Amino acid sequence: MSQPLVSIIIPSYNSKSYLKEAVASALNQIYRPIEIIVIDDGSTDDTRDLFPQFETLGVKCFCINNGGASNARNYGLEKAIGDYIQFLDADDILLPSKIEKQLTLMGIHKADLCYTPWVNFNHNINDAQKKFRFLHLDHSLKRTGKELMMSYGMDNWFIPTLAWLVKKELIVKAGYWNPAKCPNDDGEYFSRVLFWAKQVVCCNEVLAYYRVTSNDSLSKLNSPEKIDASYKSFQQIEALLLTGNEISLLSYPKRLYYMQYKLVKKMHPQLAKRAARNFDRLIAPSFLSNKVYYWWFINRFGLYNGTKMYKLLQPIWGLLKRN
C-alpha cells in the first residue's frame, strides 16, 4: 500500500530573504512522498529569481498577481494533489520530523486533523523562545474540533497555521480561504476546519517555529480597516458556531471580541466599545470567569464600563489587603 502524499503550500509576498529557509525546512522533511508548492503573490523583491533553483529540487513554483496570502493559499490548494495539506508561511520553519510524527499519530487515532506545539523566534531558531506556554494543557486527549474551539474560549489560547496538518477530505468540507485581506484570516478559516473535524490529536512536541517580524503589519490591528476586517471575521465565526446549537461553542468568539477590545481600546476607543458590546451580547461562558471580582464587574456593568470601574477600585483593594 502506497504512502499518502502530503502537499506543503507556501505563499510568499516580498519574503525573499526568508523563503529559502522555509523551503529548505519543507525539503528536509523525513517523510516521503511530499510535494512543495510555492506561490509568489506578486512580490516586488525579485522572489521569482529563486524559482529556477527551487525547481531543480522538485519544488513547484507559480507566480500570480498580488491578492493576499489567503488568495495565494487558495491557488496552492487548486494545484495540490496531496492527501494531506501543510500550510507554511514563507518566513516560518518546520522541523524535519514534523509531518512524519503527525501522520503517524493521525494514523494511530484515525484523526483527520493534528497540531503540534510551536515557539516564536526572530532571526535564528537557536534563539527561539524555549518555553511553550500551552504545554500545561492536556494535549494527550483526543478531541473533536468543536471541543478544541471551546478550549480556545475557556483556556485562552490558539494554534497558528504552520502547526496544523490537515487531511484533504477535511479541507474539502471547510472550503477555500476567504480571499479578503484580514489579520484573522487563519482564525476564520480554521474555525471552519475545526467545525467539521471529527478527531483532533496533538503531537505534543515542539516541531514548528513561527517567525515574528517587525514588518508583519497585517497581523497587527494598527488601522480601523484591519480592526473592522477582524471584527467581521469574528462575526463569521460566531454565525458558524451558532449552527452547532451549543452555547459553550460561543466562548470562542466571545474571547475574540474581548481580545480585540483589549488590543484597540487606547487607539480606537469607539471600535473597542463595539467589540465590548458584542462580548456582552454573547451569553456564553468565558475564561474571564476565573477572575472572580473582575467577572462580577463585567456582568454587572458590561465589559467596557466594568473594566474601568474595576481598575479604578484596584488600588483601594490593595490598601485593604495590606491593612
Image (cartoon, rainbow, N blue to C red):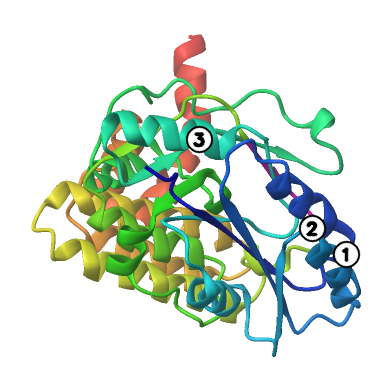
Q: Which of 302 and 103 lies nearest the eye of the viewer?
A: 103
Residue 23, image x, y percentages: 75, 54
Secondary structure mostly seen in magenta is strand
Q: Is residue 101 left or right of residue 174?
A: right
Q: Which of 94 and 1 lies nearest the eye of the viewer?
A: 1
Q: Is residue 228 left or right of residue 63?
A: left
- The residue tagged 1 is 53
Amino acid tagged 1:
Gln
Task: Give the SS element for disc 2.
Answer: loop
Image height of 298 relative to 294, above or below: below
Quarter assignment of residue 263: bottom right
Image height of 224 relative to 7, above or below: below
Start-end of magenta stretch: 208-213
Most extreme residue toward the left is 245
Badge 3 or badge 1: first in the primary sequence:
1
Q: Is residue 210 magenta?
A: yes
Q: Is residue 132 left or right of residue 93?
A: left
